[in-house]
């Protein structure tokens, strides 16, 4: 699996730069936005020696990875490209077109979107060169964009190609919002077993976290309610606060805090938390445990990447 520098990321999408691949092969890349499940790619550089017949395309996108496949790499010496990923409303992909001769294609105009045409492959003999001209017409047929791919007048031999027409959204309506609490239950009980330790249990996936570290959780978009059980062991002389945040940018009434005074080493603090999903999407949570402190945060991809604290023990 390859790791490459991301050019940008937001709710609209993210770019993975894959520059200057010598002798390119099929590759899989990690990406950070779990809801970026659609996309396309565009070239940045290309060189070959001899006859070629190939096509490059995205073959799979998951919440963690994107895979790129090349159908035939014979005589391809170098290839650079960018992968553009986005949420569902970011792109309207019109499908790969095989143009074995000059093409004139009409597509419906989509409002608040920009038209983009990207090449994905060529069929060329050893003596051929790529010499194509694109044109676009929005006036001949109202409501349609007519695009044409033709050979240059200086080179009458048409370059057989595979290309992808895409509409790219200029605006976005979907907003990713913070999880909300439906119930917070807090209990104290006596600890008769001195070996009991603090832990955070994510009940939907039956995961328990009790060691220092940073843990990422992805929750599928069918899940509507999220439940945590948190057990906090008491350490003599330690005084802590536990804070529950229901709204990051609201007044203080949306934040609930209690003091946890450890005057008795046998005392356990138990928190049962029920949260509900506001925005239907894959939810991303991060749990950070550091000695006697912890946080549970939600990652939101809107105009910028935002980390929202849901609960903090400090």
Image (cartoon, rainbow, N blue to C red):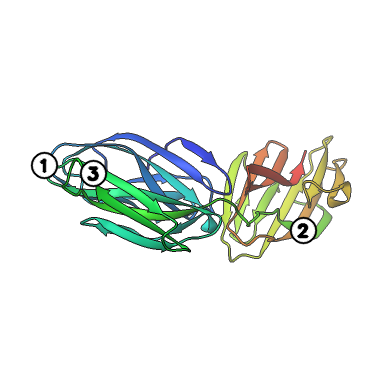
Q: CA distance from mark 1 to mark 3?
A: 19 Å
Drawn side of residue 214 relative to residue 102, left or right: right
Q: Nearer the viewer, mark 1 or mark 3?
A: 3
The residue most toward the front is 140
State which quarter of the image contains the C terminus.
top right
State which quarter of the image contains the N terminus.
top left
Q: Earlier in the sequence, mark 1 or mark 3?
A: 1
Q: Earlier in the sequence, mark 2 or mark 1?
A: 1
Residue 284, image x and y in percent? 60, 51
Q: CA distance from mark 2 to mark 3?
A: 62 Å
Q: Give the crowd class for mark 1: few <14, some 14-19, many >=20 residues within 10 Å.
A: few
The answer to whether residue 67 is visible is no
Residue 47 disc label: none
> Which residue position holds label 2?
181
> Which residue position holds label 1?
126
Question: Mark 1–mark 3 contact, CB under 8 Å?
Answer: no
> Which residue position holds label 3?
152
Question: Mark 2–mark 1 contact, CB under 8 Å?
Answer: no
**Quick one: SS at disc 2?**
strand
């Amino acid at each position: 699996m390859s790791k490459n520098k991301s050019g940008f990321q937001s709710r609209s999408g993210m770019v993975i730069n894959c520059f200057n691949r010598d002798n390119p092969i099929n590759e899989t890349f990690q990406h950070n936005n779990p809801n970026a499940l659609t996309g396309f790619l565009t070239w940045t550089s290309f060189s070959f020696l001899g006859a070629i017949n190939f096509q490059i395309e995205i073959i799979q996108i998951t919440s963690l990875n994107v895979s790129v496949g090349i159908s035939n790499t014979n005589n391809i010496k170098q290839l650079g490209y960018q992968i553009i990923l986005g949420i569902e409303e970011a792109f309207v992909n019109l499908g790969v077109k095989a143009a074995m001769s000059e093409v004139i294609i009409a597509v419906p105009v989509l409002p608040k979107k920009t038209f983009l045409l990207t090449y994905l492959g060529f069929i060329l003999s050893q003596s051929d060169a790529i010499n194509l001209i694109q044109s676009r017409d929005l006036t001949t047929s109202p409501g349609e964009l007519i695009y044409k791919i033709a050979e240059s007048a200086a080179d009458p031999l048409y370059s057989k190609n595979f290309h992808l027409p895409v509409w790219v959204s200029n605006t976005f309506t979907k907003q990713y919002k913070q999880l909300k609490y439906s119930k917070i239950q807090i209990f104290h009980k006596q600890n008769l077993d001195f070996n009991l330790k603090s832990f955070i249990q994510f009940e939907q996936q039956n995961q328990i976290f009790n060691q220092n570290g940073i843990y990422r959780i992805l929750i599928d978009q069918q899940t509507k309610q999220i439940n945590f059980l948190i057990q906090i062991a008491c350490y003599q002389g330690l005084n802590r606060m536990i804070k529950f945040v229901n709204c990051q940018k609201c007044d203080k009434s949306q934040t609930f805090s209690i003091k946890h005074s450890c005057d008795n080493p046998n005392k356990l603090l138990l928190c049962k938390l029920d949260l509900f999903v506001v925005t239907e999407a894959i939810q991303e949570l991060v749990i950070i445990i550091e000695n006697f402190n912890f946080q549970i945060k939600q990652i939101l991809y809107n105009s910028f990447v935002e980390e929202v604290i849901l609960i903090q023990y400090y």
